[in-house]
Image (spheres, grey):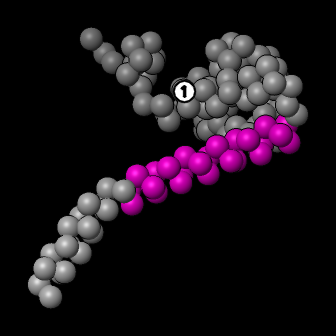
Amino acid sequence: MVTTIFSRISAGSLPDDVPAYVISVAARMVGVHAQTLRTYERVGLVEPARSTGNIRLYSARDVERAMRIRSLVEDLGMNMAGVEVIMRMSARINELEKENAQLKSRLPDSAFRQRARTRRI
């Protein structure tokens, strides 16, 4: 059996960051009109990849992000500027959480070395 990108998409085995959905499919998945996705792109909230023919291609991650944006706009009544602030702050929080986890993973090692140095003195 030949494995194509489309069979991997339907099987759910495609990585989240692989551009795979044209705008009409992505819009249907998000529950908005294609023009809404173009607006999200124009204001910098979503950055789909482009094919060699300049066709927008959305990844699963792009679709999830667009769903979150739609929720902020429709459910919470936010405007695009507010959505941009929320998305930027959310990305920064994720970065800080990763950095915190890295620092915590080094902590036991550092504490162990500090105790070993104290014992030598």
Give the residue at mark 1.
60
Q: Is residue 22 above or below residue 17?
A: above
Picture quarter with the C terminus: bottom left
Please tell me which residue is depicted at 77% across the width and 45% down the height of the picture.
85
Q: Reply yes or no: does residue 96 show up in magenta.
A: yes
User: In which quarter of the view is residue 71 placed?
Assistant: top right
- Residue 43 in the image: x percent, y percent? 82, 41
- Residue 86 in the image: x percent, y percent? 73, 41
Give left or right: position of 71 versus 100.
Answer: right
Give left or right: position of 42 versus 86.
Answer: right
Give left or right: position of 74 versus 96.
Answer: right
Magenta stretch secondary structure, dominant:
helix
Q: Is residue 85 above or below residue 25?
A: below
- Residue 33 in the image: x percent, y percent? 79, 17
Identify the residue at the far left of this view.
120
Picture quarter with the N terminus: top left
Please tell me which residue is depicted at 27% across the width and 69% down the height of the picture.
110
Mark 1 lies on a secondary structure that is helix
Nearer-the-camera pick, 91 or 33: 91
User: In which quarter of the view is residue 81 placed?
Assistant: top right
- Residue 12 in the image: x percent, y percent? 41, 17
Would residue 64 be seen by someone viewing this image from the given angle? Answer: yes
Q: Is residue 66 above or below residue 48?
A: above
Residue stretch rendered in magenta on the structure? 80-103
Crowd tier of the residue under label 1, counting other residues whose Cα lies within 10 Å: few below 14, some 14–19, many 20 or above: many
Identify the residue at the far bottom of this view.
121
Nearer-the-camera pick, 92 or 59: 92
Q: Is residue 44 above or below residue 18?
A: below
The amino acid beneath tag 1 is Ala
Would residue 53 be seen by someone viewing this image from the given angle? Answer: no
Q: Reply yes or no: does residue 85 show up in magenta.
A: yes
